Image: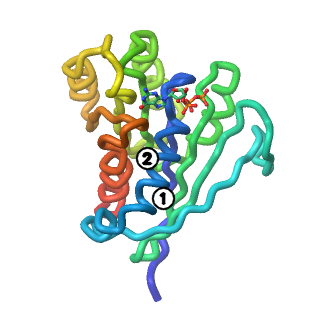
Amino acid sequence: GKEQIIVKVMILGDSCTGKTCLLIRYKDGAFLNNNFISTVGIDYRLKEQQVDQHGRQESQAPGITRFSDFLTPTNSFSQIWDTAGQERFRSVATSYYRDADALLLVYDIANRQSFDNVRDWLSHIKEHGKEAVQVTLVGNKCDLPRVVQADEGRRLAEENGIPFMETSAKTGQNVDRAFLGLAERMIKM
Ligand code: GTP
Protein backbone atom coordinates (compact mmCIF):
# COMPACT_ATOMS: atom_id res chain seq x y z
CA GLY A 1 0.00 0.00 0.00
CA LYS A 2 0.89 3.61 -0.17
CA GLU A 3 2.88 5.16 2.56
CA GLN A 4 0.99 7.75 4.45
CA ILE A 5 2.84 10.92 5.27
CA ILE A 6 1.35 13.30 7.72
CA VAL A 7 2.32 16.90 7.12
CA LYS A 8 1.20 19.54 9.49
CA VAL A 9 1.14 23.04 8.05
CA MET A 10 0.32 26.09 10.11
CA ILE A 11 -0.34 29.71 9.24
CA LEU A 12 1.12 32.17 11.72
CA GLY A 13 1.43 35.91 11.98
CA ASP A 14 -0.03 39.00 13.59
CA SER A 15 -3.74 39.46 13.90
CA CYS A 16 -5.48 40.87 10.83
CA THR A 17 -2.67 40.05 8.39
CA GLY A 18 -5.12 37.85 6.42
CA LYS A 19 -4.30 34.32 7.56
CA THR A 20 -7.89 33.12 7.47
CA CYS A 21 -8.49 34.82 4.11
CA LEU A 22 -5.41 33.15 2.63
CA LEU A 23 -6.65 29.74 3.67
CA ILE A 24 -10.14 30.38 2.33
CA ARG A 25 -8.77 31.79 -0.94
CA TYR A 26 -6.49 28.79 -1.35
CA LYS A 27 -9.27 26.36 -0.68
CA ASP A 28 -11.80 28.00 -3.02
CA GLY A 29 -9.31 28.88 -5.77
CA ALA A 30 -7.99 25.37 -5.79
CA PHE A 31 -11.44 23.87 -6.04
CA LEU A 32 -12.31 26.10 -8.97
CA ASN A 33 -9.15 25.64 -10.99
CA ASN A 34 -8.47 22.00 -11.83
CA ASN A 35 -5.73 22.85 -14.31
CA PHE A 36 -3.59 24.30 -11.65
CA ILE A 37 -3.90 21.20 -9.52
CA SER A 38 -2.92 18.80 -12.30
CA THR A 39 0.02 21.04 -13.29
CA VAL A 40 1.68 20.50 -9.95
CA GLY A 41 0.34 16.99 -9.57
CA ILE A 42 -1.35 17.52 -6.30
CA ASP A 43 -4.96 16.65 -5.72
CA TYR A 44 -6.64 17.10 -2.45
CA ARG A 45 -9.81 17.39 -0.51
CA LEU A 46 -10.33 19.96 2.12
CA LYS A 47 -12.09 19.45 5.34
CA GLU A 48 -12.53 22.39 7.60
CA GLN A 49 -13.29 22.38 11.26
CA GLN A 50 -13.11 24.95 13.94
CA VAL A 51 -11.61 24.13 17.28
CA ASP A 52 -11.37 26.12 20.47
CA GLN A 53 -8.15 26.66 22.43
CA HIS A 54 -8.50 23.19 23.96
CA GLY A 55 -8.81 21.53 20.58
CA ARG A 56 -12.53 20.94 20.93
CA GLN A 57 -14.78 21.50 17.97
CA GLU A 58 -16.59 24.74 18.26
CA SER A 59 -18.45 27.00 15.88
CA GLN A 60 -18.76 30.48 17.32
CA ALA A 61 -15.85 30.97 19.74
CA PRO A 62 -13.83 34.19 19.38
CA GLY A 63 -10.16 33.70 18.48
CA ILE A 64 -10.77 30.21 17.21
CA THR A 65 -8.08 28.24 15.47
CA ARG A 66 -9.27 26.71 12.26
CA PHE A 67 -7.74 23.78 10.49
CA SER A 68 -8.17 22.05 7.18
CA ASP A 69 -7.05 18.67 5.98
CA PHE A 70 -6.16 17.72 2.46
CA LEU A 71 -5.23 14.50 0.72
CA THR A 72 -2.80 14.23 -2.16
CA PRO A 73 -2.73 11.42 -4.76
CA THR A 74 0.44 10.08 -3.15
CA ASN A 75 -1.82 9.57 -0.20
CA SER A 76 0.11 11.98 1.93
CA PHE A 77 -2.08 13.68 4.42
CA SER A 78 -1.73 17.31 5.25
CA GLN A 79 -3.33 19.51 7.76
CA ILE A 80 -3.37 23.24 7.41
CA TRP A 81 -3.87 25.08 10.63
CA ASP A 82 -4.90 28.66 10.71
CA THR A 83 -4.01 30.29 13.98
CA ALA A 84 -5.29 33.30 15.83
CA GLY A 85 -2.75 36.13 15.69
CA GLN A 86 -3.89 38.01 18.73
CA GLU A 87 -1.33 38.22 21.51
CA ARG A 88 -3.66 36.65 24.06
CA PHE A 89 -3.81 33.52 21.92
CA ARG A 90 -0.04 33.35 21.37
CA SER A 91 0.48 30.58 23.92
CA VAL A 92 -2.29 28.58 22.24
CA ALA A 93 -0.56 28.94 18.87
CA THR A 94 2.75 27.86 20.41
CA SER A 95 1.30 24.63 21.73
CA TYR A 96 -0.09 23.89 18.26
CA TYR A 97 3.01 24.70 16.19
CA ARG A 98 5.42 22.80 18.38
CA ASP A 99 4.92 19.81 16.07
CA ALA A 100 4.24 21.67 12.79
CA ASP A 101 6.32 20.55 9.76
CA ALA A 102 5.78 23.74 7.80
CA LEU A 103 4.79 27.27 8.66
CA LEU A 104 3.50 30.14 6.57
CA LEU A 105 4.55 33.25 8.46
CA VAL A 106 2.33 36.10 7.32
CA TYR A 107 2.66 39.88 7.59
CA ASP A 108 0.65 42.68 5.97
CA ILE A 109 2.64 44.80 3.47
CA ALA A 110 0.38 47.76 4.36
CA ASN A 111 1.14 47.45 8.08
CA ARG A 112 4.69 48.21 9.21
CA GLN A 113 4.13 46.82 12.71
CA SER A 114 3.14 43.41 11.38
CA PHE A 115 6.45 43.30 9.45
CA ASP A 116 8.49 44.46 12.45
CA ASN A 117 6.93 41.64 14.46
CA VAL A 118 8.16 39.01 12.00
CA ARG A 119 11.52 38.90 13.81
CA ASP A 120 9.72 38.10 17.05
CA TRP A 121 7.73 35.38 15.35
CA LEU A 122 10.94 33.91 13.90
CA SER A 123 12.72 33.77 17.22
CA HIS A 124 9.60 32.32 18.79
CA ILE A 125 9.59 29.65 16.09
CA LYS A 126 13.30 28.90 16.67
CA GLU A 127 12.60 28.51 20.34
CA HIS A 128 9.39 26.49 20.19
CA GLY A 129 9.17 24.97 16.71
CA LYS A 130 10.53 21.72 15.31
CA GLU A 131 14.20 21.95 14.40
CA ALA A 132 13.57 21.00 10.75
CA VAL A 133 10.44 23.13 10.34
CA GLN A 134 10.05 24.67 6.85
CA VAL A 135 9.15 28.33 7.11
CA THR A 136 7.97 30.54 4.24
CA LEU A 137 7.68 34.30 4.71
CA VAL A 138 4.53 35.75 3.14
CA GLY A 139 3.82 39.46 2.64
CA ASN A 140 0.06 39.50 2.18
CA LYS A 141 -2.32 42.22 0.89
CA CYS A 142 -0.10 43.11 -2.08
CA ASP A 143 -3.20 44.64 -3.71
CA LEU A 144 -3.01 47.51 -1.20
CA PRO A 145 -0.70 50.57 -1.22
CA ARG A 146 2.43 49.26 0.42
CA VAL A 147 4.40 50.61 3.36
CA VAL A 148 6.78 47.65 3.42
CA GLN A 149 8.91 47.32 0.27
CA ALA A 150 9.27 43.92 -1.38
CA ASP A 151 13.05 44.21 -0.94
CA GLU A 152 12.68 44.45 2.81
CA GLY A 153 10.73 41.20 2.89
CA ARG A 154 13.18 39.52 0.54
CA ARG A 155 16.17 40.62 2.61
CA LEU A 156 14.66 39.43 5.86
CA ALA A 157 13.86 36.07 4.29
CA GLU A 158 17.39 35.75 2.88
CA GLU A 159 18.89 36.55 6.29
CA ASN A 160 16.93 33.64 7.66
CA GLY A 161 17.45 31.31 4.70
CA ILE A 162 13.76 30.95 3.94
CA PRO A 163 11.61 31.49 0.82
CA PHE A 164 9.63 34.70 0.43
CA MET A 165 6.63 35.73 -1.60
CA GLU A 166 4.01 38.42 -1.71
CA THR A 167 0.38 37.40 -1.94
CA SER A 168 -3.09 38.85 -2.07
CA ALA A 169 -5.90 36.84 -0.57
CA LYS A 170 -8.20 39.42 -2.17
CA THR A 171 -7.09 38.99 -5.80
CA GLY A 172 -5.67 35.50 -5.34
CA GLN A 173 -2.20 36.54 -6.51
CA ASN A 174 0.43 33.95 -5.54
CA VAL A 175 -1.82 32.26 -2.98
CA ASP A 176 -1.77 28.83 -4.62
CA ARG A 177 1.98 29.13 -5.13
CA ALA A 178 2.53 29.82 -1.45
CA PHE A 179 0.64 26.73 -0.32
CA LEU A 180 1.61 24.36 -3.10
CA GLY A 181 5.25 25.42 -2.98
CA LEU A 182 5.18 24.38 0.63
CA ALA A 183 3.48 21.08 -0.19
CA GLU A 184 5.99 20.33 -2.95
CA ARG A 185 8.95 21.02 -0.69
CA MET A 186 7.51 18.79 2.01
CA ILE A 187 6.82 15.91 -0.39
CA LYS A 188 10.39 16.10 -1.80
CA MET A 189 11.85 15.77 1.69
P1 GTP B 1 -6.70 36.87 13.20
O1 GTP B 1 -7.65 35.71 13.11
O2 GTP B 1 -7.14 37.93 14.13
O3 GTP B 1 -5.30 36.45 13.51
O4 GTP B 1 -6.68 37.59 11.75
P2 GTP B 1 -6.25 36.98 10.35
O5 GTP B 1 -4.79 37.12 10.18
O6 GTP B 1 -6.82 35.62 10.18
O7 GTP B 1 -6.92 38.01 9.33
P3 GTP B 1 -8.22 37.82 8.41
O8 GTP B 1 -8.00 36.75 7.41
O9 GTP B 1 -9.39 37.70 9.28
O10 GTP B 1 -8.24 39.21 7.61
C1 GTP B 1 -8.21 40.44 8.31
C2 GTP B 1 -8.74 41.56 7.42
O11 GTP B 1 -7.87 41.79 6.32
C3 GTP B 1 -10.10 41.27 6.82
O12 GTP B 1 -10.84 42.47 6.84
C4 GTP B 1 -9.80 40.86 5.41
O13 GTP B 1 -10.85 41.17 4.53
C5 GTP B 1 -8.56 41.68 5.09
N1 GTP B 1 -7.68 41.03 4.12
C6 GTP B 1 -7.16 39.79 4.20
N2 GTP B 1 -6.37 39.52 3.16
C7 GTP B 1 -6.39 40.63 2.37
C8 GTP B 1 -5.75 40.96 1.12
O14 GTP B 1 -4.98 40.21 0.51
N3 GTP B 1 -6.01 42.22 0.61
C9 GTP B 1 -6.83 43.09 1.26
N4 GTP B 1 -7.02 44.28 0.68
N5 GTP B 1 -7.43 42.80 2.42
C10 GTP B 1 -7.22 41.59 2.98
Residue 112: name its quadrant.
top left
Q: Which residue type carries mark 2?
A: Ala
**Number of callouts:** 2
- Picture disc at residue 111: none
7 or 52, nearer to the observer = 52
Residue 93 image offset from top left, x and y in percent? 62, 34
Residue 81 image offset from top left, x and y in percent? 57, 46
Helix or strand or loop: what does disc 2 sit on?
strand
Residue under label 2, please give it: 102
Q: Which residue type carries mark 1?
A: Val
| Placement of 17 over or under 131, stated as above or below | above
C-alpha span from label 2 to label 1: 8 Å
Residue 59 image offset from top left, x and y in percent? 79, 46
Q: What residue is rendered at 68% in x and 33% in y?
A: 92
Residue 108: name its quadrant.
top left
The crowding category of the residue bearing disc 1, from other C-alpha atoms within 10 Å (few below 14, some 14 to 19, many at least 20), is many
* Residue 18 horizontal side relative to residue 187, left or right: right
The crowding category of the residue bearing disc 2, from other C-alpha atoms within 10 Å (few below 14, some 14 to 19, many at least 20), is many
Helix or strand or loop: what does disc 1 sit on?
strand
Q: Are marks 2 and 1 in contact (CB under 8 Å)?
A: yes
Residue under label 1, please give it: 7
Residue 57 image offset from top left, x and y in percent? 79, 51
Q: What residue is rendered at 71% in x and 48% in y?
A: 50
| Placement of 70 over or under 110, stated as above or below | below
Q: What residue is rendered at 44% in x and 50% in y?
A: 26
> Mark 2 or 1 closer to N-term?
1
| Placement of 147 over or under 107, stated as above or below | above
